[in-house]
Image: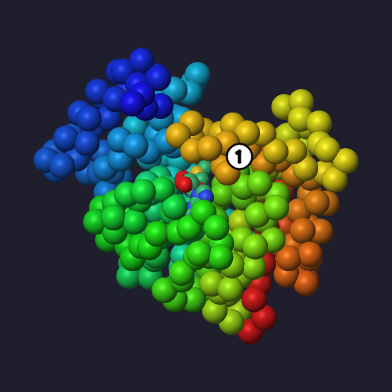
């Protein structure tokens, strides 16, 4: 089977294997030595393949690992801005964690308090064994989601940006159901102006679903690229949960994702 890394021409796969070997040996030249997080990268990680195949890639291992630092700082800035600092959170769930691009950084600042989940085979085991977090397998259908606990923060980075619109209401309800009283659900969506700048023309309802994504291995009808206007997102939150979001921060993550913050009443 051809993997996204092979599609990059092969050198990235060899680079990753060499990187992982240095990490396993605990070499002083290993990235984990100076980053002070576990820097193993799973060979099936589509996010790493995205970095490796990127037109601007120079050092994909470093770019992938440093991008997690960026996510940490963006999440902290967002939560500081609404006076709910990350480090004061009790139990935290990172939902849609993949193979742990961000999990490794979050695990260091939330020792013993982090759970991670994804639907891809092998992710719970890798997240648990590599980063020492609690982990559980998610489900493609929210009706099948089994949550072990409730959380003070559920963080969902770039998952709704891939879900078909008809799945938003059930997923918003399922993830809101994961919150402890007073807890926050933070999820991201594509920024409207960012999408328009890429030439996207929204349908009349303010959405556009494309059946392709960074994960060629997953069916595009199930996991594509979801583009939405801010008005549609805000109305969808009200339709799903019966109340508006507590906060909406434009371009809070990367260069083109907005953050939506839902608060469960105390
Ligand atoms: C763009 S990736 C982002 C990964 C991670 N949040 C990060 O920032 O590196 C989206 C992730 O959502 C996951 N995902 C998609 N549907 C899911 C579901 N039903 N339950 C849990 N995770 C899901 C995918 O498997 C993928 O790992």
Q: Quadrant of residue 132?
A: bottom left
Q: Quadrant of residue 197?
A: top right
Question: Against 83, is 236 above or below?
Answer: above
Q: x%, y% of residue 72?
A: 48, 52
Q: x%, y% of residue 100?
A: 38, 49
Residue holding disc 1: 221
Horizontal side, residue 107 vs residue 129: left or right: right
Q: How is the image coloured?
A: rainbow
Instruction: Specify few, some or many for label 1: CA neighbours under 10 Å numbering under 14, 14-19, or 20 or more.
Output: some
Question: Against 14, is 167 above or below?
Answer: below
**154 or 69, which lies in front?**
154
Residue sitting farthest toward the bottom: 266
- SS assignment at label 1: loop
Q: Residue at x 40, y 19 (%)?
A: 7
Q: Residue at x 25, y 53 (%)?
A: 130
Residue 93 visible in the displayed image: yes
Q: x%, y% of residue 135?
A: 36, 62
Q: Residue at x 49, y 38 (%)?
A: 218
Question: Against 83, is 8 above or below?
Answer: above
Question: Against 57, is 115 above or below?
Answer: below
Which part of the image, by quadrant, shows the C terminus? bottom right
Horizontal side, residue 218 vs residue 19: left or right: right
Q: Is mark 1 within 8 Å of ligand 1?
A: no
Q: x%, y% of residue 232?
A: 80, 51
């Amino acid at each position: 089977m051809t993997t996204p890394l092979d599609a990059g021409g092969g050198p990235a796969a060899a680079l990753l294997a060499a990187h992982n070997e240095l990490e396993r040996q605990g070499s002083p030249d290993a990235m984990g030595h100076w980053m002070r997080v576990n820097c193993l990268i799973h060979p099936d990680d589509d996010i790493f393949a995205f970095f490796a195949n990127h037109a601007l890639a120079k050092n994909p291992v470093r770019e992938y690992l440093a991008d997690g630092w960026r996510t940490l700082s963006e999440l902290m800035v967002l939560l500081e801005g609404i006076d709910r600092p990350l480090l004061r959170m009790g139990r935290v769930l990172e939902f849609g964690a993949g193979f742990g691009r961000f999990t490794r950084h979050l695990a260091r600042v939330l020792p013993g308090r982090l759970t991670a989940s994804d639907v891809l085979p092998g992710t719970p085991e890798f997240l648990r064994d590599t980063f020492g977090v609690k982990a559980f397998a998610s489900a493609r259908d929210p009706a099948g989601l089994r949550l072990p606990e409730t959380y003070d923060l559920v963080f969902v980075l770039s998952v709704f940006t891939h879900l078909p619109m008809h799945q938003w209401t059930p997923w918003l309800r399922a993830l809101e159901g994961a919150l402890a009283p007073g807890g926050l659900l933070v999820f991201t969506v594509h920024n409207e102006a960012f999408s328009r700048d890429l030439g996207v023309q929204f349908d009349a309802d303010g959405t556009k679903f494309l059946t392709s994504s960074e994960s060629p291995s997953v069916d595009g009808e199930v996991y594509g690229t979801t583009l939405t206007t801010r008005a549609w997102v805000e109305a969808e939150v009200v339709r799903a949960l019966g109340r508006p979001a507590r906060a909406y921060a434009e371009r809070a993550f990367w260069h083109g994702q907005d953050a939506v913050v839902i608060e469960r009443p105390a």
